[in-house]
Structure formats: C-alpha cells, structure tokens
Image (spheres, rainbow, N blue to C red):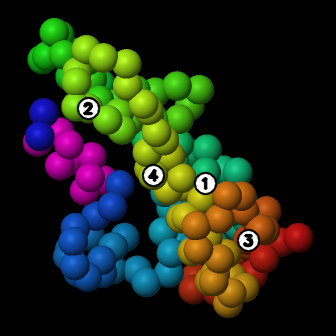
C-alpha cells in the first residue's frame, strides 16, 4: 500500500527538488501552461489552441478521484477490519481529522488535493497575466490561448 501511495504522490506532485531535472521532456519544460495543456489534451499546444480552466480542473479532479478510489479499495481489501482514513464524498476527497479512537465517530476534513486543480490553474493564470493569484477558490480567467510555445494570453 505504501508503494501505491508513493506512486500516486509522484504522479501528483513529482519528485522533491528541482522539477525540471530528469529525462522526461515534459518535466524539462518550464512553461506550466504548456504542461497543463498536454495533461488535458495529451499533445503539445499549437498557436491558437485554447486551454479552458474548466477542462483542466475537471481532468485533474477525475484523475485524482480515480487514484484515491484505488487507494481506498486497496485499504478495504487489505485491512477490512479497520475503517479507511480517506473517503470520497460528492466528488471531494476527505480525510479523518481525529483518528485517535478508530471505532468512535470521526471528524472529516477536505484534503488539500481536492483544491490542487485550482492551484494548478492559478499558475497558468500567472503565466498569462503576470499576476500571482495563489490558492484561489475559483479561476479569475476562464481560458488562455497559445500565442507561441512559451507565450499564452488570457481569453475573456
């Protein structure tokens, strides 16, 4: 189970350290908008291509939900007598906040990974506008258009 957790962590967040190191050409790109476009469309962007916040956020969420559903299923198969400290509810990933007594009622909180898609989009917005907008609840621009491989501009 720990090995699967490590695989998921590497998929979601990459390795610790310089994110542009390694043999993966995708990781060598310094343009987050280009990487986000490839994550959604599985190809490099061309001038005129549009990346919408809704596409990136939905793609990210669905991938994360599938990954966490696999973790929860593995927990239930491996440790059927113990309640899993994670659960998925209404498309959100929740974690047990107070796991002190396993069989007592628990308080659940939303995991940060549920908000990670908005954070990823905020970096795309920052590249397009030049203005930092860290940890937003909602996107401030709806889409960006590719001008060249490393230049994007907001679509209003």
Report whether 123 appears left or right of 6.
right
Distance between the Cα atoms at labels 1 and 4? Answer: 17 Å
Q: Which label's residue is closer to the chain start, 2 or 1? A: 1
Q: Main secondary structure of the magenta part?
A: helix
Instruction: Residue at 25%, 14% (x, y): give it.
Output: 103
Q: Nearer the viewer, residue 105 or 9?
A: 105
Q: Which label's residue is closer to the chain start, 3 or 1? A: 1
Q: Nearer the viewer, residue 114 or 144?
A: 114
Q: Nearer the viewer, mark 2 or mark 1?
A: 2
Distance between the Cα atoms at labels 3 and 2? Answer: 42 Å
| Quadrant position of the C terminus in the picture | bottom right
Q: Nearer the viewer, mark 4 or mark 2?
A: 2
The disc placed on residue 112 is: 4
- Residue 136 lies, with reference to residue 19, above or below; the image says above
Q: Nearer the viewer, mark 4 or mark 3?
A: 4
Distance between the Cα atoms at labels 3 and 1? Answer: 11 Å
| Residue wearing tag 1 | 56
* SS at mark 4 in the image: helix
Q: Residue 69 occupies which quadrant of the picture? A: top left
Q: Residues within 10 Å of mark 1 (few under 14, many from 20)?
A: many
Instruction: Residue at 40%, 80% (x, y): give it.
Output: 29
Distance between the Cα atoms at labels 4 and 3? Answer: 25 Å
The disc placed on residue 99 is: 2
Q: Which residues are magenta?
A: 3-11
The disc placed on residue 144 is: 3
Q: Which label's residue is closer to the chain start, 4 or 2? A: 2
Instruction: Residue at 13%, 16% (x, y): give it.
Output: 79
Q: Position of residue 87 (x, y in %)?
A: 40, 26
Instruction: Residue at 38%, 25% (x, y): give it.
Output: 106
Q: Residues within 10 Å of mark 3 (few under 14, many from 20)?
A: many
Q: Which label's residue is closer to the chain start, 3 or 2? A: 2
């Amino acid at each position: 189970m720990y090995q699967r957790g490590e695989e998921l962590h590497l998929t979601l967040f990459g390795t610790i350290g310089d994110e542009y190191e390694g043999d993966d050409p995708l990781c060598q790109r310094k343009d987050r908008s280009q990487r986000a476009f490839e994550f959604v469309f599985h190809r490099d962007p061309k001038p005129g291509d549009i990346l919408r916040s809704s596409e990136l956020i939905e793609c990210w969420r669905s991938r994360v939900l599938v990954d966490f559903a696999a973790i929860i299923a593995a927990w239930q198969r491996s440790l059927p007598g113990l309640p899993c400290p994670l659960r998925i509810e209404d498309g959100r990933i929740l974690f047990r906040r107070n796991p002190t007594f396993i069989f007592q009622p628990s308080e659940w909180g939303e995991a940060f990974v549920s908000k990670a898609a908005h954070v990823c989009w905020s970096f795309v917005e920052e590249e397009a506008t030049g203005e930092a907008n860290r940890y937003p609840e909602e996107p401030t621009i709806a889409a960006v258009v590719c001008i060249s491989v490393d230049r994007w501009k907001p679509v209003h």
